Amino acid sequence: MMKVSGLLVLFCGVVVHAQEEFPLRICEENLTRNPCWNLRHIAVVHRHTARAPQKFPENDPYLRPALYPRGAGKSTLLGLQQAHVVGRMWKSWWRPRFLSGNPNEVYARTSALDRCFETTQALLFEIFSPGPCHENHQFCLPFDPVPIVKPPMGFDKNINFCHSNTSSQLANMTQIMTTPIPMNLGNQFRTLEDFIAYAKKQSGLHHMNNVDFFSAVIDAYISNHWEGYPLPPWVREVWPIWHWAADKLYNTLHQSTKMSAGHGVVQDVAKSLRSATAAPADGVMKKLSLFGYHDVTVSSIWTAMAPELEELVPRPDFLAAIFFELYEDGQRGEYVLRIRISQGLTPDGRYSPLKVIRAMNCKSDFCPMEEVLEPLERYFAVDDCPKRSLV
């Protein structure tokens, strides 16, 4: 794994070792046809970087808005630094071997929320900037030649949580309250309900419903821990259970939104990959597509392709990503996809290595493009959210 830290200089030295992560040409072995495939396009669906809590409880000395000066739900300063470091790593994978530096080779789109836009902007800054900020401060000037599509708030066709309402979320959470706490996490509590009761008592927030309590306390202390801010003793004492409970509650809260969260993004990914198989109208072939969205977007797509990931990776970490790698056999005019994922940043500041997933029951690491895209589109075919989008 490659070190990612708020100290950007710590990334230096790993660039050379990362360059073969995306080979331009792959030849299959031990096959009668023995074709060689050339890299043609990469579509990436990634989660945003670290963000501030979305809500703050009143008078909590540990969860203070002043700790997050950019605002609730916004990218944190540490998060933006980490996005720049990951962007520099991605640059080492793709430039100049795959991307020439022409911004017309890249398409980028994000959700309407600033944290997604800022993350994609930071990644593109590093991919296209002449050099890192810490080596020459003139490179720290705003530099982003790739236009990013960012729909107006509430009008994004790709992220419509029409089924996300407190009543349905509370009902779903009630169903999991009897879930036993895993034995390897300790015996302080018998069930998830016991843990929630403990946390509400310690925080003095008995009146708060479980949905709001998740955002304002459970998930908020996850942010504090990530940023290196203090945690109260009663949180530190049960931290392994706290983290497990946060993942469990997250999955339950988003069960009803996964279909609408993945529907539009999958359509855009499929469009970008199919477009890359045709001759470009303007003479410049699109080689990279970036889609900056949310944890539920990433998890809905990768669990659709490989259902076992729902248990293995309950919640994608910051900057988690799915890489759809399109390879072409130029002589035969055939296209295959290799799909790899990164779970994103780990708590100790490392970027998780890429892992191949065999999507849609594919028997090989490389599958014919349509054998992946067609069933994936069928999986997300139904989206009954009202169509009120502009972009």
Image (spheres, grey):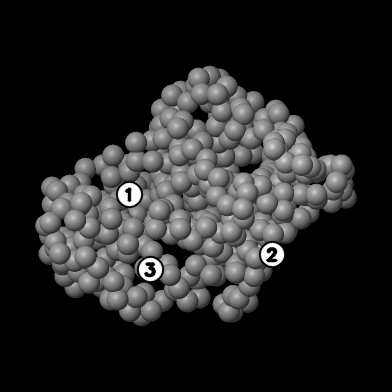
Name the residue nearer the viewer: 41 or 152: 41
Tell us which disc is closer to us: 3 or 2. 2
- Residue type at mark 2: give it: Glu
Q: Residues within 10 Å of mark 1 (few under 14, many from 20)?
A: some
Q: At numbered mark 3, what does the secondary structure look like: helix, strand or loop?
A: helix
Point out the image quarter for the C terminus: bottom right
Q: Quick check: marks 1 and 3 in contact, CB under 8 Å?
A: no
Where is residue 371? Give x, y as percent.
69, 59
Residue beneath the point at 53% across and 47% down: 341
Question: Please, what is the three-letter code of the amino acid marked with disc 1?
Answer: Ser
- Residue 4 as seen in the image, left or right of residue 106: left
Q: Give the position of the N terminus as an image quadrant.
A: top left
Crowdedness near tag 2: few (<14), some (14–19) or many (≥20) residues, C-alpha within 10 Å: few
Identified at 38% across, 41% down, the residue is 346
Mark pair 1, 2: CA separation: 38 Å
Q: Quadrant of residue 262?
A: bottom right
Mark toward the start of the polypeptide (1 vs 3): 1
Q: How far apart, in angstroms, are the residues tagged by discs 3 and 2?
A: 28 Å
Q: Earlier in the sequence, mark 1 or mark 2?
A: 1
Q: Which residue is mark 1?
A: 223
The residue identified by callout 3 is 253
- At a point 28% along the width and 76% down the height, the residue shown is 174
**Seen in the image, is 142 located left or right of residue 244?**
right
- Asked if the residues shown at circle 3 and circle 2 are in contact, with their CB atoms under 8 angstroms apart, the answer is no
Is any part of residue 263 visible from this angle? yes
| Front tag of 1 and 3 | 3
Label 3: how many Cα within 10 Å (few below 14, some 14–19, many 20+): many
Q: Picture coordinates of residue 203 (x, y %)? A: 16, 60
Q: Label 2: which residue?
A: 374
